[in-house]
Amino acid sequence: MRIRRECAERDILLQPPRKILLATDLGARSDRAQDRAVSLMRRYDAELIVLHVIDKSNEAAGIRRIPFFPYRKPSERRIQRARRQIIDYLGDAASYVKVRIEEGVPHERILRVAVEEGCDLIVSGVARNEVLGRFIIGKTVNRLLRKFDGQMLVVTERVRSPYRGIVVLADLSEASKRALETAASYFPAQPLILLYAFAASRSSVVDDMDAHREQMRQAALRDLADFLNTANLTMDQREHINMLVEFGAESRLLSELVEASDVELVVVGSQKHGIFLEALLGARTKRIISSLPCDALIVR
C-alpha cells in the first residue's frame, strides 16, 4: 500500500481550473451560475469568460415586429443589449471578465468557444419546475453534458459562501475515480465525503436481513478502501476524505444526505461510451442532477 501511494504522489496531479466559461442565457436564474463562476474565478485566480449565445432561429420574427432603426441590424441591437446587461450584472467583477456574445445554436457555440479559449470548466444554470420541486436541466445543458470533454458545474442554489459540504459519488469506476481526484484538486483543504451506494444481493432468501446487509456493507467498505488506494492523491488529500457506505439507490441516498446535512456540492463522474451506453449513463447523470437540491460538478 505504501509503494502504491508513493507512486501515486509522483504522478502528475490534477489542478484547479485556470480558465472558466460561464454560459448564461440571461434568464431569471442565471444570476446564481454567474455568482458561483465569479466566486470560483476569485478563489482560483482563474480567467473567466462570460458567454451569451443569441439563437438566430428567433430573429426572423423579430425583424417583422421591430422595424425601427433600419440602418442597424436587429442582431446588432441584441448583441449590444446583451453585452450591457452582462456588464451590469457583473458589477465590480466586470473589469476582470472577458465577455463574448455569439450567434447560432447555443450548445454548438458554447462548445466551440470552450475549445477556442481552452477552458477547463463550464459553469451553467438550470430551470426549475416549482410544482414538482425538481430541477429541469434544459436542452442546452443536456447536450453539453453529452458532448463536452471537460468538467461542467451545474448551479442550482444561490451563492452564500465557498462550498462547504462536498460529496463525491463513487461507483468504483474509472470515471468516479477521476471525479474524486478532481474534487480533491479543486478543494484540497476541505473534507470530502466519498459515498458508495451498494446493493445487498439475494436479500430475499436470507433469514436475517439486517445481518446480511451488514455483511454486504463491510464487503463494500473494503472494496471502497481498495478503490481509494488506487486514486492519484497526495497523503494530505487522503486525510480529508471520509468514506460513507450505505445500502440503497444512489439518487435517494444523495438526496437524503444533502437534505440532512450542509452538503452544497455533489461531484459525479461521467464517461463517454458508444451511443447506447452514452445514452444510458447520460440518463443516470441527468437523473442524479434533477433530484439534487444542490449544485453538481460533472467530471469526464
Image (cartoon, rainbow, N blue to C red):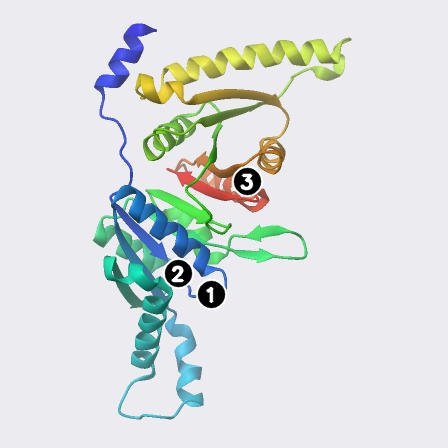
Q: Nearer the viewer, mark 2 or mark 3?
A: 2
- Counting from the top left corner in percent of width and height, residue 175 is at 40, 30
- Counting from the top left corner in percent of width and height, residue 296 is at 47, 42
| 260 versus 1 height, above or below | below
Local crowd size for mark 3, using a 10 Å CA cut-off: few (<14), some (14–19), many (≥20): some
Q: Is mark 2 on a helix, strand or loop?
A: loop
Residue kind at label 2, given as amino acid type: Thr
Q: Distance between the residues labelled 1 and 2?
A: 8 Å
Marking on residue 213: none
Q: Which residue is drawn at 30% across and 67% down?
A: 102
- Front residue (pair 201, 246): 246
Q: Which of marks 3 and 1 is in front?
A: 1
Q: What element carries label 1?
A: loop
The image quadrant that residue 92 belongs to is: bottom left
Residue that mark 1 sits on:
27
Residue 61 shown left or right of residue 130 in the figure: left
Q: How far apart are marks 3 and 1 (CA)?
A: 23 Å
Q: Are marks 1 and 2 in contact (CB under 8 Å)?
A: yes
Q: Do the residues labelled 2 and 3 touch (CB within 8 Å)?
A: no
- Counting from the top left corner in percent of width and height, residue 108 is at 34, 58
